[in-house]
Image (spheres, rainbow, N blue to C red):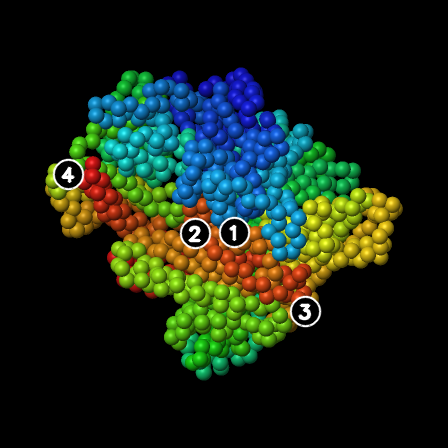
Amino acid sequence: MSAATDKIAFNVNGRDVAVAAAPQTRLADVLREELGLTGTKIGCNAGDCGACTIRLDGAQVCACLMPVAQAAGRRVETVEGLARDGRLSPLQQAFHAHGAAQCGICTPGMLMAAEDLLARDAAPDEAAVLDALGGVLCRCTGYRKIVDAVLSVAAGAQPAPVDVDGGVGARLAKVDALPKLTGAEAYGADAWPADALVLRAVRSPHAAARFTVGDLAPLHARFPGLVRVFSAADVPGPNAFGIYPVGKDQPVLADGEVRYRGEAVLALVGDGATIAAIRDEDVPVSWAPLDPILGAAAGVAPGARRLHARLEDNVLVRGRVARGDPDAAESAAAAVATGRFETSFVEHAYIEPEAGWARRVGDRVEIFVTTQTPYMDRDEVAHVMGLKPDQVRIIPSAVGGGFGGKLDLSVQPLIAIAAWHLKRPVRCVYTRPESMASSTKRHPATIAARFSADRDGHLLSAVFEGDFNTGAYASWGPTVANRVPVHATGPYAVPHVRATTRAIHTNEPPSGAFRGFGVPQAAVAHETLMDELAAGLGIDPLEFRHRNALRVGSVTATGQRLEASAGLQACLDALRPRWRDLRAAAEAFNKTGAGALRRGVGVACMWYGIGNTSMSNPSEMEIGVARDGRFTLFSGALDIGQGSNTIMTQIAAEALGVPASRIRLVTGDTDLTRDAGKTSASRQTFVSGNAARLAAEDLRAQLARLGNTDLAALPEISPGFVAIGRGRFDPPTTALDAEGQGVPYATYGFAAQLAAIEVDTGLGTIKVLRIVAAHDVGRAVNPQQVEGQIHGGIAQGLGLALMEEYVPGRTENLHDYLIPTIGDIPPIETLLIEDAEPLGPFGAKGIGEPALIPTAPAILNALHHATGVRVRRVPATPDRVHAALREAGVAP
Amino acid sequence: MAAANGAGRILAGGTDLLVQMRAGVVAPGAIVDVKRIAEMTTIVEELGGFRIGAAVSAAVIGEHERLAQAWPGVVEAVNLIGSKQVQGRASAGGNLCNASPAADSGPALVAAGAMLTIQGPKGRRDLPVEKLHAGPGRTTLEPGELIVSIVLPPRPARSGDAYLRLIPRTEMDIAVVGCGVSLAFEGDVCTSARVGLGAVAPTVLLVGDAASALIGSRLEPDAIARAAAACRAACRPIDDKRGTIAYRTKIAGVLLARATAIAAQRARSH
């Protein structure tokens, strides 16, 4: 291949094209950047995620691994070619009807892989589907609805009907599904002005170092396309951001010292080709590495270097909940269970890396970006730029997965500052390694816990000490440290409690928000110990949990009396028949002596406070009606794939008494919508759903007052609208006192899950065979979406249990950092319990985080049932399981 | 290639090269696309065996019925290189040349006794596949040389092969340990055996002592145990997050026993 750029001709979706590109240019880049076919997504640029899957002469290939020259003369099909004459293909229809797309970022790749399969095999079985789609990663759906969708097409069935009108309780199809299915959706990397400059951050290769930047003139001379190099000195306002007013400690660009590997130090801005050509080693940064503080224990070791001058012991925050006298209670107990547990850094691994672009408009800056929290982004960017919040506009792109990781700033301040100074649009798309190195993680936890119970199997006491490695900067560390002690008992009535936590700084990635805010780590501890207490007392593990389950009238560790909607016992009742059957089947299997294989079934429970902990977290919504009778819901609640656009529409439709198809959505744009808070803490259905309900009820009341007036005859009170309803909801909570007593949440989700597994004792591998998940969601506003959340949460819980462990510098890609593939997720049965929450919209609570929490401990308890071995460190990788089996004499 | 003075790189499927170029690991002076060289992109049956072009994709190898009948272990291994949509691009030759000790094709081809046909500025030569790797990411190829084809020998009656690997998830992963076994029998007695091990040393290993333990045996438990012990003894693995030294070593023996059982089963029905 020469470097000459003769035109390369091929056929795309039936159209002949010829592009002038270097022959080794990746086909994915040519499709997206040259041909505008952004339906082909780039998740990793390494063939690990499959988001860029296209068909080449009919066969599925990763377009990111394909030099464009090798496409010459061949037939390329992309997702944009599937729908014909505005009609979805049968496969697209099936994805729509089955709810197989959540965030949608993997959907094009999944569709193309499945098209390839169905072209080769018109009637594939499930194994063939798993094989064909095995190279496409999905982080949202847990894959099961994708499998169902493909199999439904294979079966040749008429596509299932798509519900477009249903209210609360209906399986309304995702209202924003179509662009995700056709490839038209614009994610953070999919839209940019033609004249945008490109920004790339130079990042620290060291976990801890001081640095100086040398003379940049030679760099500019060597790369004329380099427009400007930004450094800490170019940050117009305070060079510090962070979630909490007390925790604004993270620089946009480091100022002389870096505190973790991956921290941004400079921002290179120029034309795309130039920025791609500049290597980090071309940039004159001199590093003086420091001994890094690695691990929470090192952070609090006597004499440890301070990461932040204001904290003398590297402890960012302490949490505490105390009630009764656990030591006295324990001394009178019939059984005590004690354990020490460890969890790892976990990466969000959304398939869409951080991306966006910004432009300056007069004295304002507008940012198009993938985010979970437009209003917080607006305020944070304004802070670091020294602007007023209304000088910043956030226009959220479609979000290709978040899970908490897009609650923190990423590209936003970098592109805003560059666009501000240069008065030109500036674009930035993180690479996969950059995304993984620089973004926040789930807190690694070290937990020491002790529970006791009386002879009748009633819990007496819980003592819980948790150290959470919060990494280099505060981020959401305080949230984890505060939320965990409240949940440390698990969903059980425990009269005597002492739960303490510390969030400890280290020279590791900032630990932030990740689906569950520390509660999944705590659940590993309390659910293991529940099993051990039950065993010690000779009580069935499920019945032990049932006996102690929080219920209406129970008092929690914070002294809160539960007034309603506490359906854990109903969840366990629903599981009981499966529990008995699956346990018996596993024990029968093990009696047959199946070589190295052992089966086991475990149960685990959880509770989860919906919304922020003891903090005001209001949502506001508006809904307008036009003269033609159409409604527009202005929703600041960001749909990151979990489905809030659909849920808000259903709630508003129900409250208005109109079909959902009459409601149009305007979402997220901070100039157009009211603040509906963050998409986090499982709060959107409960909090923003209430705001949507109240807005719709307000509008309905206004319309009722108008009687039979013809809307078309009314004056517009604002452009396009004759009436606007408004709603605001802030969940009633109280502050926690020094002993952690108070009402931290207005309501809680409850759940219990079973995991049936098979252990290969020769290898230490675990195959999950089946999950049964019973969740009290108050009211399932949309059962299909609730199932989708449960499936996806279980997939992430399975990853937490068995394979996910982020190691800085070692796992900054999707082949060394493992997330579950389609073949890892077993059949999942969901059992929805609807113990209505009087405060919730039509009784609903939240589901996003509860779905994940019980899965890992259920798997660990199943491992014990199968083999008698306890693993207290996750992930329970094959080598750790094997070592435990050998130690116990189960494996040779 | 010769003109590039050692800075040239071969492009077959691109599944490794494009990633390395992106990551800045390599910056080739010239890229030579071999996907259109007929000899390198076809599978021919010759002399009772098979000559597989080095750039033939894994998917094409997987669909070759007679090859899959004769060498199921080799085909299984090649079909574990990446995912379905990577297999449409990735080749066994590329997988070998990337020289990862964990490459799935290595142990199975070593067990099969595959020979490489190598073309260079000085002409052609043949090389046993186990002599290709010099260390992680390094081969013994001279500057300007490339692998043209991979030759699998004829298959005698009552012979069979198998490849097993261990990964923490179901698919698309790098082997923690990989083990290829090829066996031939006369009656119940194992008359020839070859064992290849991957991901337990800087290069793929041909474990002669394991083969010796199997040859002449009827695969009695004692023979299997001695072969497994030979595999463990041959291991010089690294400790990393995919597996500890102790674990990889132990698993090499377990996989040897299991792969041997599968290969023997296939030999009996061959």
Q: Secondary structure at mark 1?
A: helix
Q: Is residue A606 above or below residue A144?
A: below
- Residue labelled with disc 4: B185
Badges 1 and 3, same chain: yes
- Classify 10 Å Cα crowding around label 2: few (below 14), some (14-19), many (20 and above): many
**Relative to A750, B79 lies left or right:** left
Reading the chain from its start, which is encountered first: label 1 or label 3?
3
| Residue at (49, 68) in percent of width and height | A573
Q: Amino acid at mark 2?
A: Pro
Inter-mark Cα distance, 4 to 2: 40 Å
Q: Amino acid at mark 4?
A: Phe
Inter-mark Cα distance, 3 to 4: 78 Å
The percent coordinates of residue A604 (x first, y second) are 46, 64
The answer to the question of whether label 1 and label 2 lie on touching residues, with beta carbons closer than 8 A, is no
The percent coordinates of residue A523 (x first, y second) are 49, 63
Q: Amino acid at mark 3?
A: Thr
Badges 1 and 4, same chain: no
Label placed on residue A792: 1
- Classify 10 Å Cα crowding around label 1: few (below 14), some (14-19), many (20 and above): many
Chain ID, mark 1: A
